[in-house]
Image (cartoon, rainbow, N blue to C red):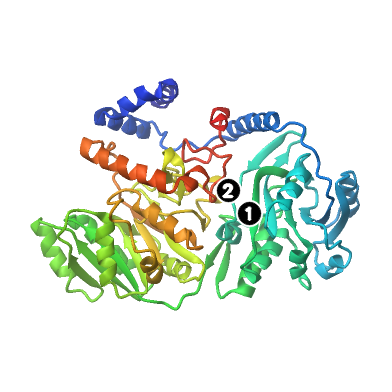
Amino acid sequence: MKKTIMRIVRAALQIIPKNVKSRLKQSERLTGLYVRSIRKAGLFYDAPTPKQTQELYRQWLDFHNKSQPCLQQQDRPWQIIVFSKQDIDGCIRYLSNDKAVGRCFVFNANGNLRFKDVLRRLDTQLPVLLLNEGDRLSEQANHYFCGTFENSDADILYCDTDSLNETGEQTSPCFLPDWNPELLFSTAYIKSGVLLMPDTLSRLEGEVFHTISGAIAHLVLMNKSLRIGHIALPLVHIQKQQAHLEQELIDVATCISKHTDATSNYNQSMRLNQVMWQSSTPLVSLLIPTKNGKALVKACINSILEKTTYINYEILLLDNGSDEQDSLVYFDYLDTLDKVTVLKYDEPFNYSAINNFGAKHAKGSIIGLINNDIEVITPDWLTYMVGHAEREDVGCVGAKLLYSDTRIQHAGVVMGYGGGAGHAHKNFPRFHSGYLNRINATSNYSAVTAACLLVKRSVFERIGGLNEKDLAVAFNDVDFCLRVRELGLQNVYCAEAELFHHESVSRGLDVSPEKAARFNRELSYLKETWKRYIEYDPAYNPNLTLKRENFSIRTVEELKG
């Protein structure tokens, strides 16, 4: 009954004018009541059902087809290599019906044929599409693939996908992010419909692969300068979405083991690879700001000291004006421990300034930003995170954070949520896989939260630390991550590092006039400074909603803008 009532309330809120809704939000009492009621009703996460997803996809297809009518095929032909195990004749018959295809070659995915045998027969002036046996091209595929390739500098181009049901209806859309190397390593998310130029394909000469995912992993691990583009449209209809997933993941894991010093473990229950990158075990400086909060700090530091298997770290507790006697006595005790140093910071609260102060006193080559309400769950959390943080092409590394009741608090930051930024899959259950397995899978996001964040000291200093002038409290971590990303580094959500973040889940929003004004100033700064990422987050997909954190397909109203 509660759930039904709250669904009605939610629906009613959707039709209330924005100015009225804004006034309602100013009431802390009403806001708190709404949040508590939603949670009690069990509506704290709202993953769309398969039926809802299909209906949204029908509407999306209808909108797209009406807005892009009568697309003309490109005159430029292309070549197709089909990864096939058995139905070679069927592949050729199907593809021969496409007049835009200049040549079709079938690559034996059982490993009896090497790429060099196919390369000899290719026209070196034409692009080459890699396709799996049984997959079908949409009517728009040639237009978008060849048209995009003509006007981009990409070496590799991939697209979104879907499937066809028994009646030929398009179903099961996979709206993918732009190039996301960690997601490829963990889930083999690029499976079919990959366009390359022959000179890029020639880099596979002499290799044997069973899957397209393995071939792409080999290419990007051997040639880090490759430019990889993405068309955010479902141009390929995959026959069996999960049929070859295990082989794809094994192929990718094999490439990782062959070309890096990382170890990749195929997790069969989660259907993904868990990759641990080797590190030189550098000293890590964990910065923990606090004011009082003895109980939180004790739980946080004890969990780090007692559970963490990584040994080479120091803890800097940054005391921002504590005045509770119990806390002060406890902090004095902490200061006697070998791994803990307590530093006094007696200035007005400014999260960015406190951490910048702590970084100046840190001895480690890796800086860790840790909230005082963090508690370790997985003992090897720091081992996984340091492995990523030391990599040359990685900037910030964030963790999977859970509320006290085990719901997802943070699994990466998506730009554009709420007009600013928000947490992917927020409030989903701990063991939910999320959209395209992205709760479980380590992947790249544009930003991660500083409640638990690692970064190389050299990178921290290169960009001048956190922005203490414009972002004293909110969005400083998002701004920091985006400045790191602008250096050409990838930010990583490390799903294997799982911790509690005991951020209160019962309180309403803090909308006191002073704090609301400060929040709005900092939100305005974020919107003005990072407008490009807010309008288009490369780690998300433009066909997915920004109204909720559930990766639902955009409604027609959202598509219309």
Residue drawn at point x = 74 percent, y = 65 percent: 200
Residue drawn at point x = 41 percent, y = 67 percent: 459
The label shown at residue 368 is: none
Side of 98 where 307 appears, left or right:
left
Classify mark 2: residues with Cα within 10 Å, few (<14), some (14-19) or many (20+).
Answer: some
Determine which quarter of the picture holds residue 397: bottom left
Residue 132 screen position, x and y as percent: 77, 53
What residue did someone put label 1 on?
189
Tag 1, which secondary structure? loop
Given residues 447 and 520, the one toward you in this image is 520
Q: How many marks?
A: 2
Q: CA distance from mark 2 to mark 1?
A: 8 Å
The label shown at residue 436 is: 2
User: Which residue of the protein is positioned furthest toward the left in this rendering?
Assistant: 325
Earlier in the chain: of badge 2 and badge 1, it is 1
Tag 2, which secondary structure? helix
Side of 502 where 99 appears, left or right:
right
Residue drawn at point x = 71 percent, y = 64 percent: 215
Are the residues flagged by discs 2 and 1 in contact, CB closer than 8 Å? yes
Residue 381 screen position, x and y as percent: 41, 64
Residue 369 visible? The answer is yes
Classify mark 1: residues with Cα within 10 Å, few (<14), some (14-19) or many (20+).
Answer: many
